């Protein structure tokens, strides 16, 4: 199993540890300390050794931040995690605040008196965050202070897990579509054009992409934890624990880079400063440690986006073909799974854990599964309303008749990463369930049908996924879509479909399309496909070429939850055509009862 079901932490432990931290603040000269959910690489997903927020508070979500004061404790989370946070932290101690209704900076500026001092670990926050927080606090006369040693790490002590040593492998050019040599050459060409001497890469997926390597330091994410300095001329320096390297990988890298141990990083960064090199640093993604080490006010440090982010997001032909193959393979596993679920769930014997286990087994039976792409969200009934619910032995409930079951899962194959959500009726759904499912489906189809001009970003189109829900007085508190990597992170920037998705959508980008609706204490609905931004094409009679979305996911949508009377003919045509495509692609790989199930699950829906 790639997923376990133990509870990550409990509120009682969190409250005791938080009180220990509060007791230390006075001796540290701090009135408050900020604990983010991040590591030195600013990744969304972190190794166990960097799970400081979970260890301290009990909250296990992938995004959040705690502010611990001498007499207060506040946890900031976004709309995906408000329900989860309330169950995982001691609400007698913690105040849970939703972002963006309030931000840590605004909240602290109001909470603390003039002259108060807020501490932070410069390895765990990007410079952009530090600058913004400092400005917000300054308005109230509150100071921000770097700490040399993280007090959470000191409390954690010897029980803190060791840093990971996951093996690093080569990603072959047949899947990468471009050699590492050519990627490095392109990076160096860009540095020379911008008259910069070097760029520091801090994001693990950027480093994995640039050097055509993959790792296993972080659960479900095939990336190695590493740093790199790419010089305008000569070999890049790659800071990576050599114990992670297989012989093939060492041979691959030896011709590309100068391999250095992580302990050498500080010396090499300081050498750039001493040599007065002009260094590019992404202040939105690089730990603040790099900025102040190079010189907080140095004009030689240039803020510029990580140069790997956009080319990594624009998938090349090999990556696109690999993704199509991965989704067809994954669609077969999902169809077998949904057929099994329909046969077994009405018995009342299947619980959320059994549902996760069976899905993982079916993906493993492809013989090419490398990992799952995230912990499967397996939410029956009211658990489905917790957007990022993670089932544990303590929370697992049976799939019961008359309820909905939400399963959000994905796989890591060497040729592509998948992410798909389906909401399934167990027994007969209520009319309300059918109506709200159909509103969500209409939003998903609205995005799927879009044609849009060059220069369009995700914020421009997010409302298309919400219109049907808005017209019914409903909405969802998460973005409509996130970028997805190529055998990399299932959450990949910079593109998104959301109210804050300001990055232009470009051909080759893969993005999720996943509107939802969540009724607290009752059920959750989400339907998710991955889509590919296609090259602009002419429309007959039109004046401008338009992008479109190619749907990659090939998994049936539960027809029993569709209310045709609420849909337009165009929407029904899309759904029937999608199901025909799924049947044609997946059907030849299925036999017996599974094939019969697919035929029924993808049969056309009429308008009567």
Image (cartoon, rainbow, N blue to C red):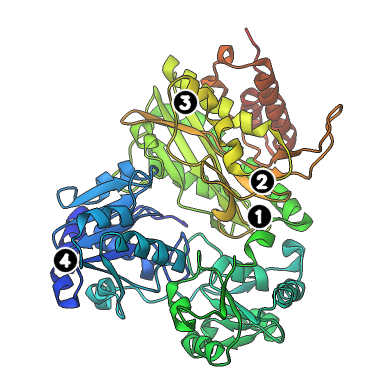
Q: Is residue 521 left or right of residue 216?
A: left
Marks 4, 1: nearer the viewer: 4
CA distance for labels 4 and 1: 45 Å
Mark 3 to mark 1 CA distance (whole Å): 29 Å
Residue marked by disc 2:
327
Question: Depth-wise, is mark 4 or mark 3 nearer the camera?
Answer: 4
**Contact? badges 3 and 2 (CB < 8 Å):** no
Q: Earlier in the sequence, mark 3 or mark 1?
A: 1
Q: CA distance from mark 4 to mark 2?
A: 49 Å
Does label 4 or label 3 sit earlier along the sequence? 4
Q: Residue at x 31, y 63 (%)?
A: 138
Q: Which residue is mark 4?
A: 22
First in sequence: mark 3 vs mark 2: 2
In terms of secondary structure, where does tag 1 sit? strand
CA neighbours of label 2 inside 10 A, class few (<14), some (14 to 19), many (20+): many
Whether the residues at callouts 2 and 1 have beta carbons within 8 Å, the answer is yes
Residue matched to label 3: 425
The image shows residue 480 at horizontal and vertical percentages of: 53, 39
Q: From mark 3 to mark 2, how far is it between C-alphas?
A: 24 Å
Q: Quick one: label 4 or label 1, which is nearer the N terminus?
A: 4
What residue sits 55% from the left and 20% below the top? 562
The x and y percentages for residue 384 are: 39, 35
Please identify, in this view, whether the residue under mark 4 or under mark 2 is nearer the observer: 4
Q: Is residue 49 visible?
A: yes
Image x and y of residue 277, in percent = 60, 86
């Amino acid at each position: 199993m790639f997923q376990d079901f133990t509870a990550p932490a409990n509120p009682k432990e969190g409250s005791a540890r938080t009180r220990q931290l509060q007791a230390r603040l006075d001796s540290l000269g701090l009135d408050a300390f900020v604990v983010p959910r991040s590591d030195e690489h600013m990744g969304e997903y972190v190794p166990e050794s960097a799970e400081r927020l979970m260890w301290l508070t009990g909250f296990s979500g992938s995004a959040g931040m705690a502010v611990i004061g001498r007499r207060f404790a506040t946890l900031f989370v976004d709309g995906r995690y408000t329900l989860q946070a309330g169950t995982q932290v001691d609400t007698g101690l913690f105040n849970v605040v939703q972002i963006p209704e309030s931000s840590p900076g605004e909240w602290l500026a109001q909470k603390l008196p003039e002259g108060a001092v807020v501490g932070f670990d410069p390895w765990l926050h990007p410079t952009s965050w530090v600058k913004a927080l400092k400005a917000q606090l300054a308005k109230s006369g509150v100071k921000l202070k770097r700490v040399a040693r993280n007090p959470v790490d000191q409390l954690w002590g010897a029980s803190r897990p060791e840093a990971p040593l996951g093996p690093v492998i080569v990603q072959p050019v047949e899947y990468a579509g471009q050699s590492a040599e050519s990627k490095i050459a392109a990076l160096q060409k860009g540095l020379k054009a911008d008259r910069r001497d070097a760029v520091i890469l801090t994001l693990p997926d950027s480093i994995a992409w640039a050097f055509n390597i993959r790792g296993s330091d972080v659960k479900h994410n095939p990336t190695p934890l590493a740093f790199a300095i790419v010089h305008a001329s000569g070999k890049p320096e790659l800071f990576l624990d050599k114990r992670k390297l297989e012989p093939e990988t060492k041979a691959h890298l030896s011709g590309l880079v100068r391999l250095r141990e992580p302990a050498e990083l500080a010396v090499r960064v300081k050498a750039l400063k001493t040599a007065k090199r002009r260094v590019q640093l992404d202040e939105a993604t690089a730990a603040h440690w790099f900025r102040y080490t190079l010189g907080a006010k140095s004009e030689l440090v240039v803020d510029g986006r990580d140069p790997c982010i956009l080319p990594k997001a624009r998938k090349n032909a090999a990556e696109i073909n690999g993704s199509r193959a991965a989704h067809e393979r994954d669609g077969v596993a999902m169809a077998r799974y949904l057929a099994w679920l329909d046969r077994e769930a009405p018995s009342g014997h299947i619980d959320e854990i059994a549902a996760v286990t069976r899905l993982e087994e079916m993906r493993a039976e492809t013989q090419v599964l490398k990992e799952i792409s995230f912990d499967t969200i397996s939410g029956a009934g009211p658990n489905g309303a917790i957007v990022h619910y993670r089932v544990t032995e303590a929370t697992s409930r049976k799939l019961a008749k008359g309820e909905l079951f939400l399963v959000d899962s994905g796989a890591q194959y060497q040729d592509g990463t998948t992410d798909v959500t389906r909401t399934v009726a167990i027994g007969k759904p209520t009319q309300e369930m059918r109506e709200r499912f159909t509103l969500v489906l209409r939003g998903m189809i609205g995005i799927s049908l879009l044609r849009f001009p060059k220069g369009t970003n995700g914020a421009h189109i997010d409302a298309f996924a919400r219109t049907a829900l808005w017209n019914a007085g409903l909405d969802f508190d998460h973005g409509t879509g996130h970028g997805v990597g190529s055998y990399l992170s299932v959450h990949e920037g910079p593109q998104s479909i959301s109210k804050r998705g300001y990055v232009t959508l470009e051909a080759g980008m893969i993005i999720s399309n996943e509107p939802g609706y969540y009724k607290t204490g009752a059920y959750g609905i989400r339907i998710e496909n991955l889509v590919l931004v296609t090259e602009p094409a002419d429309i007959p009679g039109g004046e401008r070429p338009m992008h479109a979305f190619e749907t990659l996911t090939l998994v049936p949508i539960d027809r029993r939850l569709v209310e045709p009377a609420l849909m337009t003919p165009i929407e029904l045509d899309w759904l029937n055509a999608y199901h025909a495509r799924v049947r044609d692609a997946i059907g030849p790989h299925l036999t017996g009862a599974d094939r019969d199930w697919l035929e029924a699950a993808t049969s056309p829906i009429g308008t009567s």
